[in-house]
Image: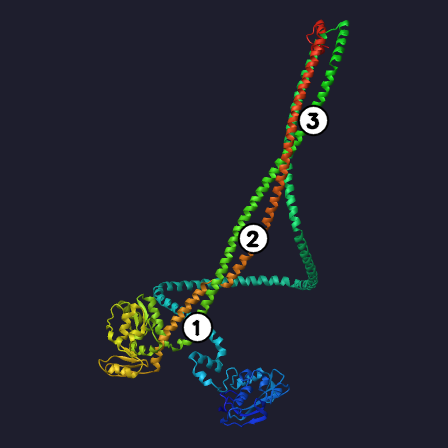
Amino acid sequence: MAAADGHSNGNGGPGGGRVRIHQLELENFKSYKGQQTIGPLYDFTAIIGPNGAGKSNLMDAICFVLGVRSSQLRGSRLRDLVYALDDSDREADGRTAFVRLVLRTGAGAGELLHLARTITVGDSRSEYSIDGCVVSWEEYDARLRSLGILVKARNFLVFQGDVESIASKNPKELTALLEKISGSDELRREYDELEEQNSMAAHEAALIYQEKRTIVMERKQKKAQKEEAARHVELQRRLKMLKTEHALWQLYTIERDRERIEAELAEIRPSLQQVQGDKESSGNDLSAKRKESSEFLSQLKLCEMNLDKRKAELDKKEPKFLKLKEQISSLKLKIKSHEKDIEKKEDDKRKHVAEMERLKSDLADIKTQVDALSVQCNDESGKLRFAEGQLQEYHRVKEVVGTKTAKLRDEKEVIDRQLHAAVEAKMNLEENMQQLVSRRDGLLSQECELRSGLQNVRQLITKHDGELASLRDERNRIAKERQSTGSRYQRLRQKIDDADAQLRELKADKHESERDIRLKETVTSLKKLFPGVHGRMHELCSLSQKKYELAVTVAMGIFMDAVVVEDENTGNECIKYLKEQRLPPQTFIPLQSVRVTPIIEKLRALGGSARLVFDVIRFDRYLEKAVLYAAGNALVCDDIDEAKTLSWSGEGYKVVTVDGILLSKSGLMTGGTSGGMEARSHRWIGNKAEDLKKKKSRYESEMSKLVSPRELQSRELATSEKIIGLEGKLHYLNVQQSKIKEMLLLKASDRSTTEKEINLLEPGQKELEARIAEKEIEVSNLEKRINDIEDKVCRNFSVSVGVKTSASMKKGN
């Protein structure tokens, strides 16, 4: 059996009154064949029938016309909702079905609103209409919302299982459901933003309070500065007078400048027309210039295209350029070598010129000596006179000598020619040797320069390799840091979100009154001013379970808000400060001097639900005396009967129930759940909220100290760009290194070839030197033999003419 109330729970509408179902019209919807009218419905209508009578289909029809999807109406497709006699009829297209819902709206529920939804087999969409006019789904949904009917929240019917489902939900899920039904879920984002603004406002309020405390501390200083203030007032009066005089002087100056400017303006006005004409002309020129600029821009684009084309060609020619550059470098080295050879040749030339000058000087001296000797010889030849017969004898002897030495002289002439040829060959060989040596020295110099360049390139490669390794390590470090920072950032963000969710769930701020806020601010000020102030009792402690909040609040009484201090002196200073500042009084518990009653250990073994209030409170060790003073040996239990047994029978104890009922030893029973006491008990939740706020603040502080993942990503990209640049440089340097090595091998090969040529020429040089020495000896021997023959043939004639040798006779002749 299914039952439906004839009212919708929406109370929107034009008149702001309730909305009621008046009538339902169906045609070929599910099990309803043809057109069926159900209604009019009254304030309470029950639909009763056996299984399969169509009760659930009637509920589905109401849901269908109110926009619920077919998948939620026990049908996978819209065609499943159209009445069909059999399977062949079910698959036929063109069949239609509709549901029309007639609602009573308005203040008196007298206005009728017709809502209809139609489906056609073969079309995957539904058609919606309001009062017979076809509308879109958005307009249809907006009209339902105006009536308080939320399709997504399904707040217009109680479906099967909804009661059980809602009863099994926890408070958080119920809150979410209520927010969804009420529509406040759509304001969640705005609420979060406002809550964040509230947090910022609270932070600003704390800063303002700090400024207020600073102002209070400065008030005493202001009293001591009273005399200085009076002197300042006097100085201000004098300053005002000086400012007045200065202002008058400025007015005078301004008036004078105004008169001058008006005079200049009168002079300038005649030329204004000319300037305006120039302006029009300039406007025309500007138009022309803009046209020219457009043409120039077109030309600029063309030039840019040509530039890109040239750059592409340049990139293609770059390898050839590098090769030519290397050839130029090689030619430069050769030029340097040739320049050195030229300098050396010039040095040799200068030496040869100096030698020629010296030889010319020696030649002049020799000529002078020869002239002197010629004169002397002439004098001596003048003494040698041949007789007629002696002259004939002399010619005969001379002819005989020529005949006898002719063969030797021919031999000597041949050897002289050979000697001259050997000397010429030696000179040519020495010149070739000099050129080869110069070439070898030039190649050695070029090799040294290339080795130096290779060393520089290797140093740069080593340096860039180190930098590249360092940058790669830096990039890996940044990547790891980015990953770890991102993970840490996400964890902190999740913790902050969790803390926000818990704070929203606790709603601690709703339980703080103005008085609680003032007391909290007062205690905060005391903690800042006096080091011995620890804080309020409920701020320093927490409870083992939530159910004990009200019981512990009742058991502690006024001591729940008591301020725990280190000693009596600190307490007295605090009381004095409260009086001076006219702040509300506080209760103080000094740890060093407070007297407490020891725990009765047997109370911990009573059994049942009874526990010491002292044992359900969590606190730091140093607060034990203060907590024991506030709670004493009071007991807490779950129900009132157990509390009565413990309090009113036997020894009798102070007992409080979890509901807040206090039973004293004297038999009095007070308390119970009240608004004021329950509000005070919420301060334990406030402690948790404060802890959550501190954690949230700590997480936010840690997050602010983290480097932004975006910044780390930018650093990583910048490092990657540096790595790419260094890799390009290293590639160029490696290419350059390979080319220098190739040139070194080439130069070494040329030098080796040159040295081989030098080694080949050295034996020839030595052979020529030996041949020249041999020929010189042969010439000397031939000259000696010729001279001996002449002396032997001319000996008798020389004696007859009074000459010792034939050589002397030749000189005399």
The front one of 233 and 665 is 665
Residue 529: which quarter of the image?
A: bottom left
Going by the picture, which residue comes out furthest to the front? 87
Which amino acid, by three-letter code, is at mark 3?
Answer: Glu
Of mark 1 and mark 2, the one earlier in the sequence is 1
The correct choice, above or below, for 157 with respect to 474 in the image is below
Q: Which of label 1 and label 3 is nearer to you?
A: 3
Q: Measured from the top left, where is residue 21 in percent x and y? A: 52, 91
Instruction: Please state which of residues 297 and 438 is positioned toward the viewer in this rendering.
Output: 438
Cα separation, mark 3 vs mark 2, equals: 62 Å
Q: Quadrant of residue 429?
A: top right
Outermost residue to the left: 651
Q: Callout 3: helix, strand or loop?
A: helix
- Where on the picture, by quarter, is residue 549? bottom left
Marks 1 and 3, how far apart at CA: 110 Å
List the residue tagged with mark 3: 424
Please say if 382 is above or below 435.
above
Residue under the image location 65 percent in, 47 percent down: 323
- Residue annotated with mark 1: 500
Q: Using the image, tell me which numbered label, if any, was put on residue 726.
A: 2
Secondary element at image label 1:
helix
Kind of residue at badge 2? Leu
